Image (cartoon, helix red, strand yellow):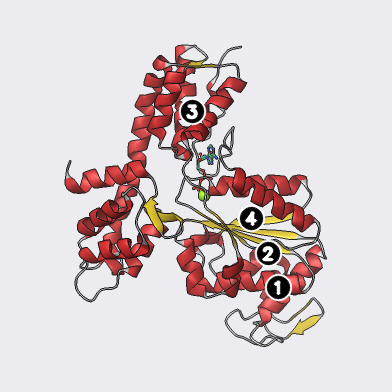
Amino acid sequence: MTLTYKDNPFRPDFGGMPPLLAGRHRELIELDTGLGRLQQGITPPTVIISAPRGMGKSVLLNKLERDANEADVKISKTNAGTIKTLRQLTAWLAPDLVKAARSGGFRFGGKFLSAGLDFSKNRGEAAGEPEWAVLLQDALLKRHRTKPLIICVDEAHVLEPDVALALGNLRHRMNDAGHPVWLLLAGTPGLDAVLRGVKATFIERVTRLKPVLLSEEEAAEAVQAPLAARGWQVSDEALADLVADSDGYPYFLQLWGSEVWKASVDLGRTGLDGDTLSKAAVEVKRQRDEFYFHRYTELMDSARYEPFQGVDLAAVTLAVINAVRRDKGATLADVTAAIQTGLPPNREPISIREYFEARGFIWAATPNRYIPGIPSLTGYVEAQFTGR
Ligand SMILES: Nc1ncnc2c1ncn2[C@@H]1O[C@H](COP(=O)(O)OP(=O)(O)O)[C@@H](O)[C@H]1O
Ligand SMILES: [Mg+2]
């Protein structure tokens, strides 16, 4: 069998389904359990998937979408960037409703409205419910009857507060009406700050999934198993080198796997060994440097945002890096104190911490234990700031 580039199973692209979804047993069990509950007409708790970019959040949602389709359960998935307004949210979930509203006076779901839908005003029947929210529920009930529905929002850390609240309320209303709606939100660790800002009560009873860096065994499996399944020889030593270099970061593992594949095609062999590894390393290093540089530029660009005005960005970043790099990570108090060392007097550190979390530079993978999002990126940023 001749090797070709197009048979490359590795997917170093965001949202791309990897040939082997390594080390996500807990997450997959939660998603499976939820899907099963939903099929029995029971609403599972809202799921919040939060982790830095490249950790495999979108892939988990894609996997759920696949499973739901197979189980014939209706699933609607979108990116938070496409539902910035309540009108867009409504247009996504119930396009007919917005189409009808466009023509001014219209009849919808047994109600007559003399004017177009007003998303800003609260004219609802139920106390505190805007009219469109009531109509949206009607529209969804009409559309899906009592069939369960899954609503997934990816990149949910960019959700507008009113849209986040509307989603939570919609789930609540639908469930009260006996129509199970399962809500899943995925985003960077900044998602928590967004939801805290909304003060929605649904946030207190959620299932939290935090896909972390893969262990050495899991990382090895992510590359080894797809190759072995194709009859490749995998040298233990080369695999160990690859794994050590990857940080257990899922995106880097796909990058490595993909470049090893390309190098093997070039060298005309089906094996992961010292030769294919060193040939692949050139391109892996180049692409990873692009990635690091991009993320570093993003950090430098933060200087233009208000919370960073007059702030010594290098001092703050280095202090935070030092705090989270300790063996046991840093507590919220440690991170706050670290940020404060670089702040002018009387400035609050919260927005800056939230910025670092939203960008996934630091996160609390376990409660009150802040760690670097991607350890090697932290090293890169540090090197830029210290000139070492
Ligand atoms: N469990 C996993 N095992 C192996 N590769 C994975 C895993 N999860 C994600 N990946 C790969 O990592 C990259 C990032 O995944 P993605 O879901 O886009 O991350 P996120 O949405 O968190 O930014 C993709 O190339 C994907 O194929
Ligand atoms: Mg994603």
- Mark earlier in primary sequence (1, 2): 2
69 sits to left or right of 274: right
CA distance separating discs 1 and 2: 8 Å
The answer to whether 100 is drawn above or below residue 190 in the figure is below
Could you tell me if residue 338 is visible in this image?
A: yes
Asked if residue 103 shows in the view, the reply is: no
Counting other residues with Cα less than 10 Å from the Cα at mark 1, is it few (<14), some (14-19), or many (20 or more)?
A: many
Count neighbours of disc 2 (C-alpha within 10 A) and say few if under 14, some if 14 to 19, many if 20 or more. Answer: some
Marks 3 and 4: CB-CB under 8 Å?
no
Mark 2 vs 3, N-terminal side? 2
| Element type where label 1 sits in the image | helix
Q: Earlier in the sequence, mark 1 or mark 4?
A: 4
SS at mark 3 in the image: helix
Q: Which mark is residue 77?
A: 4
Q: Are marks 1 and 2 in contact (CB under 8 Å)?
A: yes
Mark 1 vs mark 3, foreground winner is: 3
Name which residue lies at 68% across and 72% down.
172
Instruction: Name the residue at 22% across, 45% down.
Output: 384
Query: Which quadrant of the figure contains the N terminus?
Result: top right
Image-quadrant location for residue 21: top right
Amino acid type indicated by mark 1 = Leu
Q: Position of residue 283 (x, y in %)?
A: 37, 28
Mark 3 to mark 4 CA distance (whole Å): 28 Å
In the image, taking residue 224 as reference, residue 238 lies left or right, namely left
Reading the chain from its start, which is encountered first: label 1 or label 3?
A: 1
Q: Which residue, given by chain and number where applicable, does mark 1 sit on?
A: 136
Residue at label 2? 93
Query: What residue is shown with label 3?
Result: 257
Question: Is label 4 within 8 A of ligand 2 (CB to nearest ligand atom)?
Answer: no
Residue at the image position 51 percent from the left and 74 percent from the top: 198
